Amino acid sequence: MRTSERLPEHPEFLWQDREPRGAYDVVVVGGGGHGLATAYYLARHHGITNVAVLEKGWLAGGNMARNTTIIRSNYLWDESAGIYEHSLRLWEGLEDELETPVLFSQRGVLNLAHSLGDVRESRRRVNANQLNGIDAQWLDAAEVGKLVPILDVTDRPRHRVLGATYQPRAGIAKHDYVAWGFARAAHALGVDIVQNCVVEDFETDGDVVTAIRTSRGRIACGTLALAAAGHSAVLAERLGVRLPVQSHPLQALVSELLEPVLDTVVMSNAVHVYVSQAHKGELVMGAGVDPYVGYGQRGSIHVVEEQMAAAVELFPVFARAHVLRTWAGIVDVTPDASPVVGHLPPYANAFVNCGWGTGGFKATPGLGAVYADTIAHGRPHPLAEPFALDRFRTGRLIDEHGAAAVAH
Amino acid sequence: MMSLPCPHCGPRDETEFGYGGQAGVAYPARPGDLDDRAWAEYLFVRDNPRGWSTERWVHRAGCRQWFVLRRHTVTHEIESPA
Ligand SMILES: Cc1cc2nc3c(=O)[nH]c(=O)nc-3n(C[C@H](O)[C@H](O)[C@H](O)COP(=O)(O)OP(=O)(O)OC[C@H]3O[C@@H](n4cnc5c(N)ncnc54)[C@H](O)[C@@H]3O)c2cc1C
Ligand SMILES: [Zn+2]
């Protein structure tokens, strides 16, 4: 049989790549999940359709299609519960909203505790979550073992499992489907998606950003909305603003396709690994960032080796799996491990969304809705307000290091 | 894995080092004169260059000395500063 006979039909194009026009009401910089979701909600909720999403490479080629797709809302503080839980609720209706499969699978997420300090921190977080109406539970080691039979909950491992926080409504989705779903729906509402369009500089007039200079010409804008993840600082610098973010490589890896052995997501901050099994059967693993600033979309191999050592310690059955691929994205990390969403002072018509670091995939629909509302009304949405850039001056930080360092 | 040139011990594997971020960020000479904005800049904002970075590393598992080097954040090329 010829190969061509066995391959499925090439899918219909979901959206059309546009030539950029000379001016838009809103220009969104960055065609990752956040930029696409923002453009979609601008059109859908606010009727603002004269919108372009400018992407320097290909759609979702940044972190969007590199992440390990963990979705949860069990962060510590009220401000985080607000925005992440809003997002989780939108995930629960997203397939209907976009009329596209996104393979959102609420298979639950466990965050393991390995020390007395972990146990106390975890139980505190469960209590905080419950007060915010989030479905968090504390499980002891035996309950964890029942839920995840291949996890070694005996006292053999060097850092044994003492229990875990569990959020049953958490889970995973298929990241490229999510990007395509938002792109298709935004395009259908009139949004221009422009790929291979590098934003190089900006034109300003006093406190107004008037135009964007790109590799494909000058584009005037009514409002500028940055959604460039790892490259946010580079872009803000062109506007004379220094953002409190550091861009780091974040790596992940997958094994070959295996029989189903793991039907939930397991993370461990202490031994530095998290793992889920994707729909097709590959084990998906990751951990924390490489420590240095890096824009090369690659990290150091010893970081991956350490993750795998941790995974095999927890899941002895993984010892015979093989690494198929490793890769990295560039994530922009803030000092308090919480994002920055809102106005970009000193500009009256510029907004910034960045600093989601290792954990912004789960926020895709929630951030999109909240950021679009902020842009449409020219004032922060109540859920975005605590995440203003100004918190680093006022000292009102939202410290999520405990819930966000290794766990994404 | 990168090979980093410790000025005291010579080239060693990255795993022996700790990263210290942007070099040359001095404690404010007159802290009392700083307003909130200047404090925020000092505490929370660091260079984040796509390109050459002048940064501190510590040879944690070796001589335990801090030193400064220049590293390209895209290509990972390394230069010791002149
Ligand atoms: C390995 C890895 C694992 C992760 N795991 C998880 C996880 O399990 N759960 C979770 O919630 N999050 C996770 N994340 C984080 C998550 O991927 C990000 O927080 C999120 O994708 C950021 O939003 P985005 O999708 O808009 O970013 P991106 O997809 O990075 O979008 C930004 C876009 O801006 C474009 N851009 C940059 N500069 C310019 C320019 N000058 N001109 C035009 N376009 C430009 C980029 O090309 C890019 O496409 C992970 C990240 C990585 C790298
Ligand atoms: Zn040394």
Image (spheres, coloured by chain):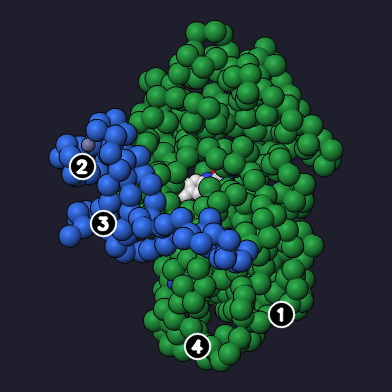
Chain colours: A green, B blue
Q: Which mark is residue A397?
A: none
Describe the element under mark 3 as helix, strand or loop. Answer: strand
What amino acid type should be assigned to the residue bearing mark 4?
Glu
**Which callout, 1 or 2, points to the residue nearer the camera?**
2
Rendering coords of residue A267 (x, y %) = 57, 31
Rendering coords of residue A407 (x, y %) = 57, 38
Describe the element under mark 2 as helix, strand or loop. Answer: strand
First along the sequence among labels 1 and 4: 1
Crowd class of label 3 (few under 14; some 14 to 19; many from 20; radius 10 Å): some
Relative height, residue A259 to residue A207 (above, below): above
Crowd class of label 2 (few under 14; some 14 to 19; many from 20; radius 10 Å): many
Res A389 visible? no
Q: Pinpoint the chain carrying mark 3.
A: B
Is A239 left or right of A403, judged from the image as shown?
A: left
Same chain assignment for discs 3 and 1: no
Real-space CA distance between mark 1 and mark 4, rounded to the nearest whole angstrom: 23 Å
Q: Which residue is mark 1?
A: A48
Q: Looking at this view, is B24 or A207 the one in front? A: B24
Rendering coords of residue A214 (x, y %) = 43, 82
Describe the element under mark 1 as helix, strand or loop. Answer: loop
Q: Which residue is mark 3?
A: B70
What amino acid type should be assigned to the residue bearing mark 2?
Cys
What amino acid type should be assigned to the residue bearing mark 3?
Arg
Crowd class of label 4 (few under 14; some 14 to 19; many from 20; radius 10 Å): some
Is A226 left or right of A79, judged from the image as shown?
A: left
Same chain assignment for discs 4 and 2: no
First along the sequence among labels 2 and 3: 2
Is there a contact, CB below 8 Å, between mark 4 and mark 3? no
Q: Residue furthest top?
A: A155
Real-space CA distance between mark 3 and mark 1, rounded to the nearest whole angstrom: 46 Å
Q: Which residue is mark 2?
A: B6
